[in-house]
Image (cartoon, rainbow, N blue to C red):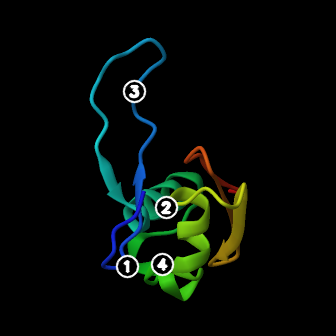
């Protein structure tokens, strides 16, 4: 998901299988930062703004327009991959 103002939004995968819980879009920067923090020993102060690591147009092509299947980039030495389905994986 994306907006015309440049912010890219993603649906965070919080619902459990079979659940009808509402999941609202969040800025991709928040979703990705949380995934990196959870998978690594980094602190929030260790991570710069998302555009330091990845071009917003490339991110939008994956999670917004879905014209690209996946995108991999490095955040402070950790490989982050985002898929068109909104899955975020971090090499830990």
Mark toward the start of the polypeptide (2 vs 1): 1
**What is the number of the mark on residue 15?**
3
**Quarter holding residue 16:** top left
Work out which residue is located at the far top of the displayed protein and give it: 18
Q: Secondary structure at mark 4?
A: helix
2 and 3 marks in contact (CB < 8 Å): no
**What is the number of the mark on residue 32?**
2
Between the C-alphas of marks 1 and 3, the distance is 27 Å
Residue designated by label 1: 6
4 and 1 marks in contact (CB < 8 Å): no
Name the foreground residue: 81 vs 68. 68
Q: Position of residue 29 (x, y in %)?
A: 42, 68
For the point 46% across and 38% down, which residue is it? 13
For the residue carrying disc 3, how many other residues have a C-alpha within 10 Å: few (<14), some (14-19), or many (20+)? few
For the point 44% across and 11% down, which residue is it? 18
Q: Quadrant of the N terminus?
A: bottom left
Mark toward the start of the polypeptide (4 vs 1): 1
Between the C-alphas of marks 3 and 4, the distance is 25 Å
2 and 4 marks in contact (CB < 8 Å): yes
Mark toward the start of the polypeptide (2 vs 3): 3
**Quarter holding residue 26:** bottom left
Between the C-alphas of marks 2 and 3, the distance is 17 Å
Q: Position of residue 58 (x, y in %)?
A: 62, 75
Between the C-alphas of marks 2 and 1, the distance is 16 Å
Residue designated by label 4: 50
Mark toward the start of the polypeptide (2 vs 4): 2
3 and 4 marks in contact (CB < 8 Å): no
- The residue mark sitting in front, 4 or 1, is 1
């Amino acid at each position: 998901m994306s907006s015309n103002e440049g912010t890219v939004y993603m649906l965070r995968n919080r619902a459990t299988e079979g659940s009808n819980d509402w999941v609202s879009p969040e800025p991709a920067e928040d979703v990705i930062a949380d995934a990196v923090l959870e998978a690594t020993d980094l602190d929030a102060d260790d991570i710069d703004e998302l555009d330091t690591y990845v071009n917003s147009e490339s991110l939008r092509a994956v999670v917004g327009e879905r014209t690209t299947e996946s995108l991999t980039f490095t955040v402070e030495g950790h490989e982050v991959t985002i898929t068109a389905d909104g899955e975020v994986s971090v090499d830990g």
